[in-house]
Image (cartoon, helix red, strand yellow):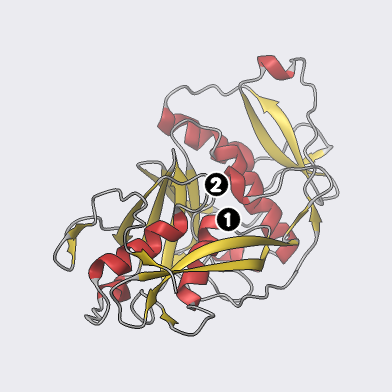
């Protein structure tokens, strides 16, 4: 789904992401749901207990989206979806909630946009039927300041620790798997200091690093050149990787198993992922080359990994 990101990422805004539990005549234990508003200064998110009228999934989604765009009765809180920004449509596909906004969403300044997006995603993903959310402006996927498509987001996509910042720079170690020169085996590459924005999920970071290609001699990318990441999300230990149609391009110098397990083995290095499913523009029908059904969920396979 996605343009490649540079290894270095820029801090384009620093936003304190503090959650304040306020009382509305109920204790935290009695409140099943909440709505995330902005404070009146529009600098922080405030978690406010909320009891919905609706009970079924469709009505709950409609009610919460309506509340997020409605002024609060408490003057200390500001609605996260500002005036002028409208939700054109929304749809729930399995566990993915897709929301389409009008063109005014693109006019939000970076700080306001990140807070708006965080409030919506964290409010909506508390619903049992919604694991992740994607944003569109009309029919165009929401992109960041660098023009890279943001893709699916979940509750883990935004920092919630008091005092931390959205879009702060962090670093981590990643273990990635690339093809050897002959294309018949995988080579393990460990990157000890990968810097990334705290707004990027680790599964997205792994895929971006794979698409960027190897840093060492004697290795090459197993993925077809030009492949873009459409979306990536994790639910119940399964990572759903959605690639664009370029992934269908065949380089028969690289074995098909090497292509698949470059992705699977790299992602399953993350402790939250045990299986991977790959789709092409959201389609899990058909077979990749001759053997690998896209509908299958693949587990780690280290039999094809060699040491230099």
Going by the image, does 188 lie left or right of 282? right
Label 1–label 2 contact, CB within 8 A: yes
- Residue 68 quadrant: top right
Give the x, y percent position of residue 156: 60, 46
Comparing 61 with 131, the one in front is 131
Return the residue found at the far left: 290
Comparing 161 with 137, the one in front is 161
Comparing 222 with 126, the one in front is 222
Element type at mark 2:
loop
Give the x, y percent position of residue 107: 65, 68
Going by the image, does 246 lie left or right of 2? left
Give the x, y percent position of residue 265: 41, 58
Q: Is residue 173 above or below residue 44?
A: below
Return the residue found at the far front: 308
Residue at the spot 41% in from the left edge and 81% down from the top edge: 220
User: According to the image, label 1 marks what residue?
Assistant: 201
Q: CA distance from mark 1 to mark 2?
A: 9 Å
* Mark drawn on residue 154: 2
Give the x, y percent position of residue 41: 86, 49
- Residue 205 quadrant: bottom right
């Amino acid at each position: 789904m996605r343009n490649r990101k540079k290894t270095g990422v820029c801090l384009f805004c620093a936003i304190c992401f503090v959650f304040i539990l306020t009382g509305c005549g109920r204790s935290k234990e009695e409140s099943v749901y909440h709505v995330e508003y902005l404070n009146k200064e529009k600098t922080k998110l405030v978690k406010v207990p909320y009891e919905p009228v609706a009970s079924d999934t469709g009505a709950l989604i409609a009610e919460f989206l309506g509340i997020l765009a409605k002024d609060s009765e408490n003057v200390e809180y500001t609605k996260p979806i500002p005036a002028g920004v409208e939700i054109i449509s929304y749809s729930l596909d399995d566990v993915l909630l897709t929301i389409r906004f009008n063109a005014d969403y693109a006019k939000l300044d970076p700080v306001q946009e990140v807070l708006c997006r965080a409030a919506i995603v964290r409010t909506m993903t508390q619903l049992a039927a919604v694991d992740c959310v994607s944003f569109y402006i009309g029919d165009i996927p929401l992109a960041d300041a660098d023009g890279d498509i943001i893709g699916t987001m979940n509750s883990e996509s935004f920092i919630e620790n008091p005092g931390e910042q959205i879009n702060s720079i962090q670093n981590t170690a990643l273990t990635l798997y690339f093809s050897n020169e002959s294309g018949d085996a995988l080579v393990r590459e460990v990157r000890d200091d990968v810097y990334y924005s705290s707004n990027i999920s680790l599964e997205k970071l792994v895929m971006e690093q794979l698409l960027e290609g190897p840093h060492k001699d004697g290795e090459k990318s197993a993925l077809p050149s030009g492949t873009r990441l459409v979306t990536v999300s994790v639910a119940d230990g399964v990572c759903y990787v959605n690639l664009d149609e370029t992934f269908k391009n065949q380089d028969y110098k690289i074995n098909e198993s090497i292509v698949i397990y470059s992705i699977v083995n790299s992602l399953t290095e993350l402790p939250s992922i045990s299986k991977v499913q790959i789709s092409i523009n959201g389609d899990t029908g058909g077979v990749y080359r001759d053997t690998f059904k896209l509908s299958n969920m693949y587990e780690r396979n280290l039999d094809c990994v060699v040491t230099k």
